[in-house]
Image (cartoon, rainbow, N blue to C red):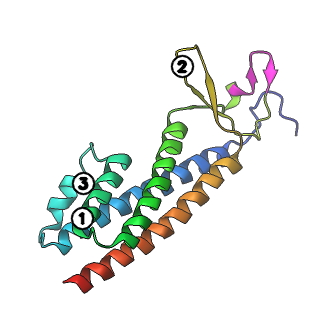
Amino acid sequence: MEIEDGKNFNWTEHYAVIGKYVTEFEKLVNEIRFESSVLFQLRGLKDWTLSSIVFGQRMFTANPLITCFESLCNELFPENKDLLNKLSKFSNAFKKQIENRNDLLHSTYLIGDHMIFIGDKKRDPKQLEVLKNSPTKKGNRIKRVVNSIQDIENHIEELSIIEKEFRGITSGILNYMYEKK
C-alpha cells in the first residue's frame, strides 16, 4: 500500500522507541537516587523515607542527582581513587546522556499524518526525524537530533552499557564500605 498522505501509516514503532528511551533513562535516574539513599543508610540513617524525601525533590533532576552522588562518594572514601575514577567516567557518560535526553524531550518530532508534507516536500514516514530549534546570536539554527529509529535505539544501547557500569561501581562501593567498617 502506497502512503500518499500518511493516513495509512502505522506510527506505533516511532512512539514505542521514544517511550522506551524515556523509560530506560528514568530507570537509571531512579537507580542513582536509590544508591544515593543507600549511602545514607550505610552511614547510619535508619529511616529510608527521609532520604527518599530529600532525593525525591524536584530540584534533584538527573544532573544535580549524579553530581550529588559523586560528591557523597568523594566525601565518604576520597582514598579510593580507583572507584572514584570509575564513577567520574560514568558521570561524564551519564551527563552526555542527559544532554541527549534533553534534546530528545525538547524537540519537534515529525510524526503523524500532518507531518508527511512539510511545505512542498514529501517526507518518508518510515524515517524518524527529530528537530530542535536552537537559535544562536547569529540567527536561527535547526539542530537535527536524530534521523532514524535506529539513532534512538543506539542511545538506548548506550544507556544500557552505562547502567551496567553503574551497577559495577555501586557493587564496588558497597564492598568497600563494608570492608571499611
Measuring from the top left, give residue 108's x and y in whole percent: 58, 30
Q: Left or right? Give the position of 180 relative to 115.
A: left
Query: Circle 1 sits on which residue?
Result: 37
Part of the protein shown in magenta: 115-122
**Residue 20 falls inside the magenta stretch:** no
Residue ID at (50%, 48%): 96
Q: Which residue is mark 2?
A: 136
Q: Quadrant of residue 28?
A: bottom left
Q: Earlier in the sequence, mark 1 or mark 2?
A: 1
Residue that carries the numbered disc 3 in the rendered image: 55
Q: Relative to 35, say whether 6 is above or below.
A: above
Mark 1–mark 3 contact, CB under 8 Å? yes
Q: Nearer the viewer, mark 2 or mark 3?
A: 2
Q: CA distance from mark 1 to mark 3?
A: 8 Å
Residue at x 40% of width, y 64% of height: 87
Q: Position of residue 30 (x, y in %)?
A: 36, 59
Q: Nearer the viewer, mark 1 or mark 2?
A: 2
Please give left or right for residue 79 compared with residue 2 in the image. left
Kindly indicate the quadrant of the structure image that contains residue 7.
top right
Residue appearing at x 23%, y 82% in the figure: 180
x 51%, y 63%: residue: 162
Quadrant of the rendering where the N terminus is positioned: top right
